[in-house]
Amino acid sequence: MKIPSVATARLLLHPMTVAEAERVVARTPRAGDTWAEGYPGDGDVRACTGFLRGVAERGDPGVFAVYRIRLRDGGAAVGGIGFHGPPDTEGFVTVGYGVVPSVRGKGYATEALRALVGVAREAGAAGVKGDADLANTASHRVMEGAGLRPGGGSGPLRHFRLEF
């Protein structure tokens, strides 16, 4: 299933194909790939590994995939964002994201997460949830900036939720 990219004011969220995810896991760009310094990070590799495992186990996830975050100006890949899989039994999808250190603090993660929340809403999910380490206040601000609200925590994590 071909999923269109999602454009924001400054970003392009490009849905990953199996071949692209395999290149990220191998950390091997092909000719023409523009990867910012530090991309892919360890989180990108973990997300693409999970995506590949999910495709092997459940098939094409449709829009509930992983997306490469690219700058609209220049096209460099600066991070990743995506769903941990299809909606759960409550209809909620879990999200994860990360950007390379050189672009942190510019609002890209919040901008990308707002767009991904829109994808989940349009696809019929009941809501979005995510979590971050208690000390990761930057990630807390990203989720809050995208409309998710803190909903307690367990162990070293703070949980966030947005119901549609």
Image: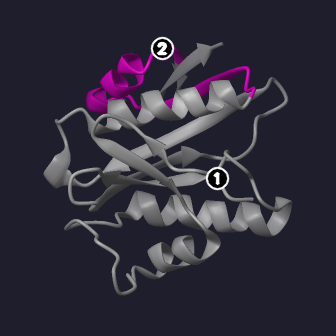
Q: Is residue 116 left or right of residue 33?
A: right
Between circles 1 and 2, the one closer to the viewer is: 1
Residue at screen point 56% across, 53% down: 66
Which part of the image, by quadrant, shows the C terminus? top right
Q: What amino acid is found at the position of numbered circle 1 in the picture?
A: Ile
Q: Is residue 99 left or right of residue 23?
A: left
Q: Secondary structure at mark 1?
A: loop
**Residue 70 lies in what quarter of the image?**
bottom left
Residue 111 picture location, percent across and down: 35, 31
Residue 145 picture location, percent across and down: 35, 19
Q: CA distance from mark 1 to mark 2?
A: 30 Å
For this rendering, which residue is in front, 128 or 112?
112
Q: Is residue 132 above or below residue 35?
A: above
Q: What amino acid is found at the position of numbered circle 2 in the picture?
A: Pro
Residue 57 picture location, percent across and down: 83, 64
Q: Is residue 27 above or below residue 12?
A: below
Label pair 1/2, CB-CB below 8 angstroms: no
Q: Secondary structure at mark 2?
A: strand
Residue at screen point 75% across, 42% down: 86
Range drawn in magenta: 124-152
Residue 106 picture location, percent across and down: 17, 36
Q: Is residue 99 magenta?
A: no
Residue at screen point 85% across, 29% down: 89
Residue at screen point 67% across, 46% down: 63
Which part of the image, by quadrant, shows the N terminus? bottom right
Upstream in the sequence, badge 1 or badge 2?
Answer: 1
Q: Is residue 155 visible?
A: no
Residue that carries the numbered disc 2 in the rendered image: 150
Residue 3 - label: 1
For this rendering, which residue is in front, 120 or 94?
120
Q: Is residue 130 magenta?
A: yes
Q: Is residue 132 above or below residue 66?
A: above
